[in-house]
C-alpha cells in the first residue's frame, strides 16, 4: 500500500527550512564584512571567554572617537537587525515544525537556539551601546551583563545552526520516504 505524504499547513512553506537558515548564515557574514568595512572588528561580540572592564577600556581607547561613533551608529544597528532576523527565523522554525506534527519540545530544540540567541544578541547590543554612550566611565555591571549575553549568544547561535539542520531533516524526511 502506498502511503501518502501527510497534509501540512502551507503557512510556512518547505523552502523556508532551507532558504531562511541560508539567509541567516549569509547575513552573519554580511554583518561581519560591514563591520570590518567600517574599521570595527567585532572583538567584543565574538569573545567566547567573555571580557572585563579592562578589555573594554583598552578596546574603546584603541578605537578612538570616530571609530566608537561608527560602532555605535552603524555597526550596532546592523547587528541588532541581524539578531531580530535570526530570532524570527528561530520562532518560525518552531512554528513550522509544530504545524508539521513535531512535538513542542522537538520544535523548541530546533528553533530555540536562534530564538533565544537572537534575544541575547539584542540585549548584548543594547549593553554595548550603553557602554559606548557612557565611555570613558565604564560600569562593571554593564560589562558583566554584556559579557554574559555575548557568551550565551555565541553558544545559542551555534546550537541554532545545528537545530536548523535538524529541522530541515525533519521536514524533508517524510517526503523522502
Image (tube, rainbow, N blue to C red):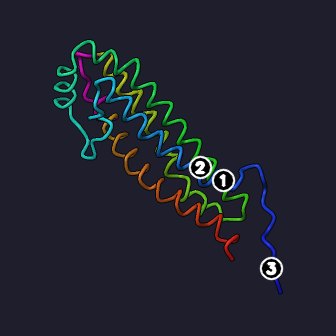
Asked if marks 1 and 2 touch (Cβ < 8 Å), the reply is yes
Q: For mark 2, give the secondary structure.
A: helix
Residue 122 image offset from top left, x and y in percent: 46, 33
User: Looking at the image, which is closer to me, 44 or 170?
Assistant: 170
Give the percent coordinates (x, y) of residue 56: 22, 28
Location of mark 2 (residue): 19
Which residue is outermost to the bottom? 1
In the image, what residue occupies the spot 50% across and 46% down? 116
Q: Which residue is mark 1?
A: 15
- How many numbered discs sit on the rendered protein? 3
Disc 2 to disc 3: CB gap under 8 Å = no
Query: Split into 4 quadrants, where in the image is the C terminus?
Result: bottom right
* Secondary structure of the residue carrying numbered label 3: loop
Task: Tell whether position 84 is magenta.
Answer: no
Residue 101 position (above or below residue 128)? below
Q: What element does badge 1 sit on?
A: loop
Query: Which residue appears at 72% of the width and 62% of the height?
Result: 100
Q: Report the Cα–Cα distance between label 2 and label 3.
A: 28 Å
Q: Which residues are magenta?
A: 135-145
Query: Is residue 144 located in the magenta-colored stretch of the structure?
Result: yes
> Badges 1 and 3: C-beta atoms under 8 Å apart?
no
Q: Position of residue 38 (x, y in %)?
A: 33, 23
Q: Nearer the viewer, residue 27 or 69?
A: 27
For residue 40, what is the image quadrant?
Answer: top left
Q: Which residue is mark 3?
A: 3
Q: Is residue 160 above or below residue 56?
A: below
Residue 102 vertical position relative to residue 95 in the rendered view, above or below? below
The first of marks 1 and 3 along the sequence is 3
- Report whether 170 appears left or right of 60: right
Q: Residues within 10 Å of mark 2 (few under 14, many from 20)?
A: few
Amino acid at each position: 500500500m502506498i502511503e501518502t505524504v501527510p497534509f501540512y499547513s502551507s503557512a510556512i512553506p518547505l523552502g523556508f527550512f532551507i532558504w531562511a537558515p541560508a539567509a541567516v548564515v549569509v547575513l552573519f557574514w554580511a554583518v561581519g564584512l560591514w563591520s570590518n568595512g567600517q574599521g570595527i572588528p567585532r572583538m567584543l561580540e565574538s569573545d567566547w571567554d567573555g571580557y572585563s572592564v579592562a578589555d573594554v577600556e583598552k578596546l574603546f581607547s584603541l578605537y578612538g572617537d570616530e571609530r566608537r561613533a561608527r560602532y555605535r551608529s552603524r555597526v550596532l544597528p546592523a547587528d541588532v537587525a541581524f539578531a531580530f532576523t535570526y530570532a524570527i527565523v528561530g520562532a518560525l522554525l518552531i512554528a513550522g515544525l509544530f504545524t508539521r506534527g513535531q512535538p513542542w519540545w522537538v520544535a523548541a530544540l530546533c528553533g530555540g537556539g536562534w530564538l533565544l540567541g537572537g534575544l541575547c544578541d539584542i540585549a548584548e547590543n543594547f549593553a554595548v551601546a550603553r557602554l559606548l554612550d557612557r565611555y570613558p566611565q565604564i560600569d562593571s555591571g554593564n560589562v558583566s551583563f554584556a559579557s554574559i549575553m555575548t557568551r550565551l549568544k555565541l553558544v545559542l547561535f551555534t546550537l541554532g545552526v545545528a537545530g536548523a539542520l535538524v529541522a530541515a531533516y525533519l521536514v524533508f524526511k517524510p517526503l523522502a520516504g
